[in-house]
Image (cartoon, grey):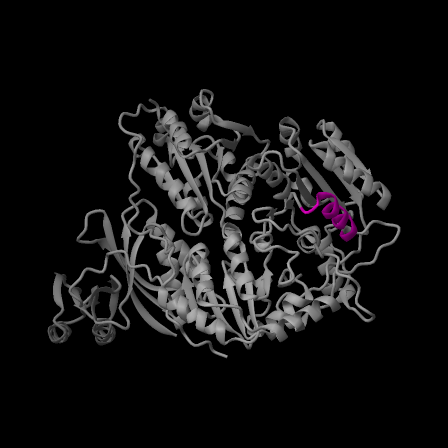
Amino acid sequence: MTGSEVVMRLLERHGVEVVFGHPGGAIMPIYDALYDSPIRHVLVRHEQAGAHMADAYYRASGKVGVCFATSGPGATNLVTGLATAMLDSSAVVAITGNVPSGLIGTDAFQEADVYGITGPITKHNFLVKDVSELPRVLTEAFHIATTGRPGPVLVDITKDVQQATFEGSLEAEVDLPGYKPTLVGHAGQVKRAAEAVRAAERPLMIVGGGAQCAADEVVAFAERTGIPVTTTLMGIGAFPAGSEQALGMPGMHGTVTANRAISHCDLILAAGMRFDDRVTGKISRFAPNATVVHIDIDPAEISKLVRAHVPVVGDLRDVLPRLGAELGRLDVGPWREQLAAWKARYPERYETGETLASQEVLELLRQASGGDCIVTTEVGQHQMFAARLFPTSRPRSFVTSGGLGTMGFGLPAAIGAAMARPGETVVCVAGDGSVQMNVQELATLYKLQLPVVIAILNNGMLGMVRQWQELFHAQRYSEVYLADSNPDFAKLAEAYGIEGHNVFDRADAEARIAEAFAAKKPVLLNFFVYEAEKVFPMVPAGAGVDEMILGDQEAPEAPREPVVSA
Amino acid sequence: MSRHVLSVTVRDQPGVLVRIAGLFARRGFNIESLSVAQSEVPGQSRTTFVVSGDDPTIEQVEKQLNKLIDVISVVDHTHAAAVDRELMLIKVRVRSPEERVEIRQIAQDFRARIVDVSRSALIFELTGDEGKVDAFIEQMRPFGITELIRTGRVALSRTAASTNRASHPTQAPAVARAS
């Protein structure tokens, strides 16, 4: 058996069904072994997209995503994808070919120090220069990627190892004396956490991306205790957005209610979240009156940014049921009434006119989906609007680049998510700027004919940058104008063989959206939306969450019905 | 800000020091000294770091080090019984026979060993804690130090057990939040 066959057999043993990748010189022996393997391969048009697809495949399914790339430029193209997966704790195994071991360090053709380059942006990485190490390394790679706090692992395999003859067993023991994730929460800490929560009058649960695998436990805990819940961008779907207890997203573009809850609460129960600066704003103004109970699987997140009074290291699936069992119904009636009053006073609101508004397009998409689809996003204003107006109520169904904020994520992520959940419709909410960063993947999408609706909210601008320039740079609009040189996105889609429509008004939008959902194949809808729209409320960078700019979310007159109600 | 001596046991893997150095650089932690060598366990090295920072920073340093897969254990010797030593080689200029006598007398008081002798210089080997090494340097300065090298501190815990078993802190200590 060759080293390459060892790789394929081990992927098969780990239950890998699909690999996203792009071949090249230094990984050709592995592609040769792939030729005879039952594992399906998705041929991407750029390796970055392959990494995003593998990442989204994990996020949508909980099954590790795998991608392949060749040495040098192939592997360096993975870098953004790996960093994206790292910051959002996504289990990805990336396998790269490298030049033959004898040429390593000689500046050989397509040689780069991939092991060195990817060290800081992976949970761990390996360079394999001896074929006998392959079973152990690959077994460890899957173990590390999927256990504890998930993350990307890269395995760089020299070409001579891929070609070498392997004799021995594919069975390998994991030998990682320095790696023992803590899954079970400390009993004393759980008890102390319960005491703290019980003592609080105004408790608030903040649910993050770590809860995507523990949605049942989050819901059970919240229902048992009655605690109000805010879900971060990464936590969307881990608690149903339509619940009466749900306050929406906190932070820079969070809801008024969620941010006020943070400022006024006397206890924060943080579950699988890491106090990102986009959530906390200025730390000294974040929850100034609150006792902080922090549950996380990664001890390094405890007290990294916000000091935890009661830390509990462990898996939410273990800790939350035990914490819930210690607690009964909390006496939070007056607090819940206060929050309900804020929610009623500050519903989502926006102006509509002749030109489509981004928000109304998202509302139409949400209505058409019946709340039953996967949403992926690119990065920018449309992402924040989607988080607020198109949140999903199921876990693993809102797939977005939160930590790294990677433009170019959404389209490949839609493909990865659609591969992970066959039959389900995926809506890729995109901007006209972001979508062009991996637009070549329309070819991959055409080939796979997946039920993906690409909804471009086209304002002809880099909208979020424009918003900051308007608010904080004296309306000096430096390099944000795209409309004069954007392609005709409908024609672009057609050039790839994908149905595409330009949409200008509400009636057309409704009809096209209905058709696109019914089509069960790729459709690109290019919505021309109001160019100067801003995402409000907004907490300016460096300000406290109590210093929101309300903008058009100000409610001077009688409150309207909230838009997100189901 | 205080100085902490950390013993970090690592797996002998290619690139493990790069991982540690990269972590310190990336997260803005300051290393004052670093020494690395084989430990008593084959395949494992013991490194000693002197790191300065406030308590939350040092807590983060320890946790981030523990997150590295190749790091087996991290022990902070600052608040526990430990011995630490440093080795220095120092080359001192000698201008006259009288100076030579004087320098040798001081060296004797410090129990520094002469390891090389020439007409115009002496090289001493000195082992001790950091204060002793610093004091010897100050004593030699008036004579003229041509060059010196220090290993940085190495430390061992005084407890009977080895420190290089996996010791991931499972629960961070509860610390009252500064309001």
Quarter of image, res B53: bottom left
Asked if residue A105 is positioned above or below residue B171 in the image, the reply reads: above
Q: Label the magenta part by its dominant secondary structure.
A: helix
Is B129 left or right of A91, judged from the image as shown?
left
The N terminus of chain A: image quadrant: top left
Quarter of image, res A161: top left
Q: Where residue A266 sits: x, y (%)?
A: 55, 75
Residue A297 shows in the view: yes
Is A92 left or right of B99, judged from the image as shown?
right
- Residue plotted at (42% across, 44% down): A145
Is A149 left or right of A223, judged from the image as shown?
left
- Residue plotted at (59% across, 59% down): A231
- Residue plotted at (69% across, 67% down): A256
Q: Residue furthest top?
A: A36
Q: Residue furthest bottom?
A: B179
Q: Where residue A239 sits: x, y (%)?
A: 58, 56
Magenta run includes residue A370? yes
- For the record, the magenta segment spans A359-371
Asked if residue B118 is positioned above or below residue B101 in the image, the reply reads: above
Residue A276 shows in the view: no
The C terminus of chain A: image quadrant: bottom right
Q: Nearer the viewer, residue A492 or B26?
A: A492
Asked if residue A381 is positioned above or below residue A163 in the image, the reply reads: below
Magenta run includes residue A266? no
Q: How many marks?
A: 0
- Residue plotted at (67% across, 45% down): A434
Q: Where residue B69 sits: x, y (%)?
A: 35, 50
Quarter of image, res A330: bottom right
Q: Nearer the viewer, residue B179 or A207?
A: A207
Q: Where residue A321 sits: x, y (%)?
A: 45, 59
